[in-house]
Image (cartoon, rainbow, N blue to C red):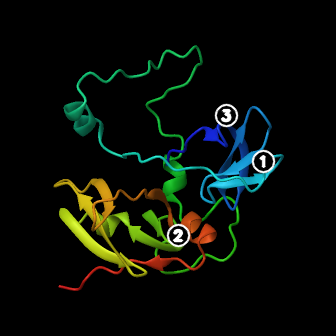
Amino acid sequence: MVYSRIIDDKTYTFGVSGLLHKSNLLLYDRQTDTLWSQLMEKAIAGPLVGKSLMKIPSTETKWKDWKKKHPETEVMSTETGYERNYFVDPYEGYLRIGSLMFPVGKVRRDLPTKQRVLGIEVDGIAKAYSLEDVQKHSGILSDTIGDKSIEIVISQDGQVTDIRDVQGNQITGIYSYWFAWQAFHPETLVYEPQKE
């Protein structure tokens, strides 16, 4: 997920606080030390409590696809001055175990706890789409959230390339784990694939 740094016409710089809320990392802004929840999309403690973050459309894609579309892209160097192997995923082991390190409350059983989901919210109604189910499609996956018809555009190799309503207006989704999405959206709907 990507958020604007501009809040009430003022530009803020953000960092990772190291703190968790419902097992989800909190950001902080360096100007006021306010803590910001990524999945609540707002400030939860500090001088700016209650202020909202504005989502910016973003893409999660494979490097080869990005490079094909944007051949002039520059890549940040791994020579950062810190001794760290940036080619090793520090969370790989965490994904293999079924349990959570920190509690989030009751976890609904609609999907496996650490199932990756695409979370979409339209007019205050949240819906989770298992990425495993989404990636079985290519083309357009049509669905409804509340009374709004939406389309999830999926490439041949299972990548989500766009989310929009039927008028073509872009909708911003959030990639998350099921346990986190449902912790922050306890009434979330869950997409059920059509039986063939």
Q: Residue furthest right?
A: 47
The reply to whether residue 155 is in sight is: yes
Q: Mark 3 vs mark 2: which is more N-terminal?
A: 3
Identify the amino acid type marked 1.
Answer: Leu
Q: Please give left or right for residue 108 compared with residue 157 in the image.
A: right
Residue sitting nearer the eye, 158 or 79: 158
Q: Residue at x 31, y 24 (%)?
A: 73
Task: For mark 2, give the secondary structure.
Answer: loop
Specify which label sits upstream in the sequence, 1 or 3. Answer: 3
Mark 3 → mark 2, Cα distance in angstroms:
34 Å
Q: Nearer the viewer, residue 5 or 119?
A: 5
Query: Where is mark 1, residue-wise?
Result: 48
Q: Which residue is mark 3?
A: 12
Q: Which residue occupies 42% across, 48% down? A: 57
Which amino acid type is shown beneath numbered disc 2?
Thr
Which circle's residue, 1 or 2, is located before the other in the chain?
Answer: 1
Image mark for residue 113: 2
- Tag 1–tag 3 contact (CB < 8 Å): no
Asked whether the viewer can see residue 137, the reply is no
